[in-house]
Structure formats: C-alpha cells, structure tokens
C-alpha cells in the first residue's frame, strides 16, 4: 500500500474507493549513544506501513527531516525551519489533493513537529479553495496529526516494560521499535548513568550542556527487539482505528 510502489493507474483506481492517505513524518536527529539518528522518521515509517496494511490505505512518502533545531549541537542532526516544514506540507497535501485525495492522516514520530504541523494545516485550509476551486468546497480537505505513541495500547505496553525509565527523548520504546525493525543496526553501548536526568531544554548549546549524551530521562539500554515488536503490535490496531474513524468523520 505504499504510494511510491504504485503506478499512476493503481493510484487512480485507489481513489475510486478511498480519498484517504497516511503520511508518515518524523525527524533526523540524535537519539543518544545507542539510538539511531533516523529513529523518529524510521518509527513513523515502519508503523505507518503497518497501519496502511491494517486499514487498506495508501501510505505516502515519509517526511524524514523535521523541526529539530534544539538537537543541532549533536553531530548528524538535521533540521528545517518551521516555515520550511509548513511550505513542504502545504505542497505535499495540495499536490495529492489535485488528484482527489481529501483525508490526510499524518502519523508523527517527533514531538518537535507538533506545533508546526498543526500550523501547516491551517495554511493548507486557507489555500485549498484558491488552488482547487469548487472541488475544495464540494469535497473539503481534512488533515489530522496523530503521534504513534498516542496509541493507548502501546502507551500501556511502554509503562509496563519501562516505567519511569521510558523518559522523554531517546526513549526505550522508540529505540526498541528500531531494534526490531532494523536489527542489523543495534548498538551496544554502556550508558552512564543508566537513566539520564530529566528537565527542560531551550537552545542547542543548552541541550548539549544539560544532557551531554543526548538522552532526557530515559534508559534506552532496556530496549530489545522483542519489546519493539510488542510495541508495534500494540500500536498498529489502535492507529488503524484512529484512521478509519478519521475517514468516517465529517
């Protein structure tokens, strides 16, 4: 159900039965000593594919670089400005809307994207009628952002497996999902302390000073592929239901 693996003929046939599409979005940023730089994008992409299969829905190309300026003191991290991300989402959505897509379910893997993506939706709504004309009035666009960890079942599994060691960045859950999906990339690293300190962040240099190894409140040393599979299996049915409910709404 990947849009990029379909032909235009298959996409046209799909649009005769559905106007919905799942759009994975994440980030390319450091995730501590044993977390992959692509963790947020990889989790969103892997889980979106599962949701697409479960809901019989197309899955669009992953937006892999997000708003991550606060990570930029760690090597390999990338960021786009909020205005750039807004324009990218605007263009992605309106490109697909031209063909008849109307329900855009953004499956997110990065907390830093949330405010910008929701702002982008308003830019899309404001522009839609000018771009699409009467078609946007007859069949209005709807966009929704859901974080993969919003799954109640997956959140429950995370609490069971990791408790207070889950943390808020470079979490044990997201590292587990990447270890299950990409076992060849697993990093064995001693973490000192096992659970990182918690607190606030401001700019890039402040982040690096407060959390020198990149983690916030987490112990991703507890991550395993088996735990990642449990999280994936818990998240996909919940998110597929969220998607179906979104399609059915007005």
Image (cartoon, rainbow, N blue to C red):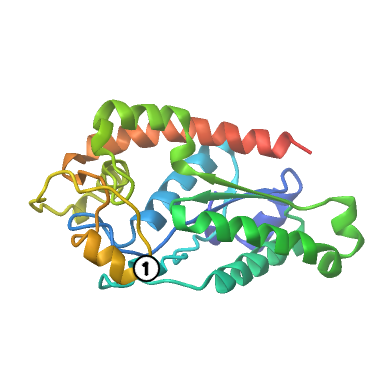
What percent of the width, then of the height, locates residue 42?
A: 38, 55
Q: Please tell me which residue is depicted at 27% across the width and 47% down the height of the picture.
A: 198
| Residue 156 in which image quadrant | top left
Q: Is residue 225 above or below residue 111?
A: above
- Quarter of the image with the C terminus is top right
Mark 1 element type: loop
| Residue 11 in which image quadrant | bottom right
Q: Please tell me which residue is depicted at 39% across the width and 50% down the height of the picture.
A: 43
| Residue 65 in which image quadrant | bottom left
Q: Please tell me which residue is depicted at 54% across the width and 69% down the height of the picture.
A: 82
Circle 1 residue = 203
- Residue density around tag 1, few if under 14, some if 14–19, many if 20 or more, within 10 Å: few
Q: Is residue 118 visible?
A: yes
Q: Is residue 127 above or below residue 244?
A: below
Q: Is residue 234 above or below residue 246?
A: above
Q: Is residue 3 visible?
A: no
């Amino acid at each position: 159900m990947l849009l990029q693996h379909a032909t235009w003929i298959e996409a046209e046939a799909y649009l005769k039965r559905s106007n919905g599409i799942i759009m994975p979005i994440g980030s390319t940023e450091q995730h501590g000593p044993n977390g992959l730089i692509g963790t947020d994008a990889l989790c969103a992409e892997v889980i979106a594919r599962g949701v697409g299969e479960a809901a019989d829905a197309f899955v669009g190309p992953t937006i892999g670089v997000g708003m991550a300026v606060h990570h930029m003191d760690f090597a390999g991290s990338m960021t786009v400005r909020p205005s750039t991300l807004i324009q990218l989402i605007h263009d992605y959505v309106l490109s697909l809307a031209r063909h008849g897509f109307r329900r855009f379910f953004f499956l997110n893997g990065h907390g830093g994207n949330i405010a910008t993506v929701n702002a982008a939706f308003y830019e899309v709504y404001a522009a839609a009628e000018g771009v699409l004309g009467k078609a946007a009035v007859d069949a209005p666009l709807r966009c929704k952002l859901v974080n993969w960890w919003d799954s109640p079942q997956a959140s429950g599994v995370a609490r069971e497996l990791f408790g207070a060691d889950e943390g808020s960045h470079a979490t044990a859950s997201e590292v587990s999902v990447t270890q299950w999906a990409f076992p060849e990339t697993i990093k064995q690293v001693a973490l000192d302390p096992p659970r990182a300190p918690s607190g606030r962040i401001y700019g890039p240099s402040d982040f690096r000073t407060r959390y020198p190894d990149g983690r916030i409140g987490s112990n991703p040393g507890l991550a395993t592929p088996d735990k990642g599979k449990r999280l994936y299996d818990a998240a996909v049915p919940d998110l597929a239901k969220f998607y179906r409910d979104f399609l059915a709404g007005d």
